[in-house]
Image: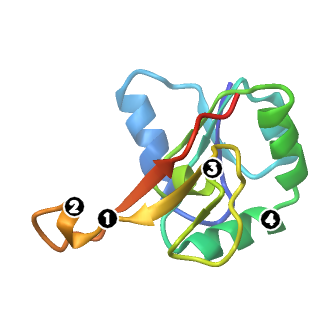
Amino acid sequence: MLTIIDYGVGNLTSIKNMLKKAGYHNAIISKEESDIEAADKLILPGVGHFDYGMTQLRAAAFYDMLNRKVLEEKKPILGICLGAQLLTQGSEEGDMAGLGWIKAKTIKFRSEMMDSELKLSLIHISEPTR
């Protein structure tokens, strides 16, 4: 079972609809510990500010169990948008520590990195975690 994690941040239905369009019809959206515990694969979506996302995630009843699932049980997790940023150690757009599952820091694209003033973030990986 693939579980899209609901921690109050993001448009979860659009992810589920995208998965259906891609032919994957067994995904569920849930914030229930039992669903996350039973998941074979996880998706951590998110939209918004880094610190708000981490605050919401840490407040979730499943937070400790999610760490165990990913770090100890090695369950695959896909971070999308803010969810990908939260997998890192932190972000220069916030003050809170991230999950730290990826030894990296989320940084803003600098104007010299792009041709326009797009609002984008970049995850800078200092070295891979094993």
| Label 3 sits on residue | 87
CA distance for labels 4 and 3: 13 Å
Name the amino acid type tagged 3: Leu
Dot 1 or dot 3: first in sequence order is 3
Secondary structure, mark 3, is loop
**Mark 3 vs mark 2: which is more N-terminal?**
3
Q: Which secondary structure lies at badge 1?
A: loop
Asked if residue 25 is positioned above or below residue 97 in the image, the reply reads above
Marks 3 and 2: which is nearer the front? 2
Pointer 4: what residue?
A: 58
- The reply to whether dot 1 and dot 2 touch (C-beta < 8 Å) is yes
At label 2, which amino acid type do we have?
Met
- Tag shown at residue 109: 1
Q: Specify which label sits upstream in the sequence, 4 or 1.
A: 4
Camera-nearest residue between 112 and 51: 112
Identify the secondary structure beneath mark 4.
Answer: helix
Q: Is residue 45 visible?
A: no
Q: Which sits earlier in the primary sequence, circle 4 or circle 2? A: 4
Q: Quadrant of the N terminus?
A: top right
Q: Please give left or right for residue 114 compared with residue 80 in the image.
A: left
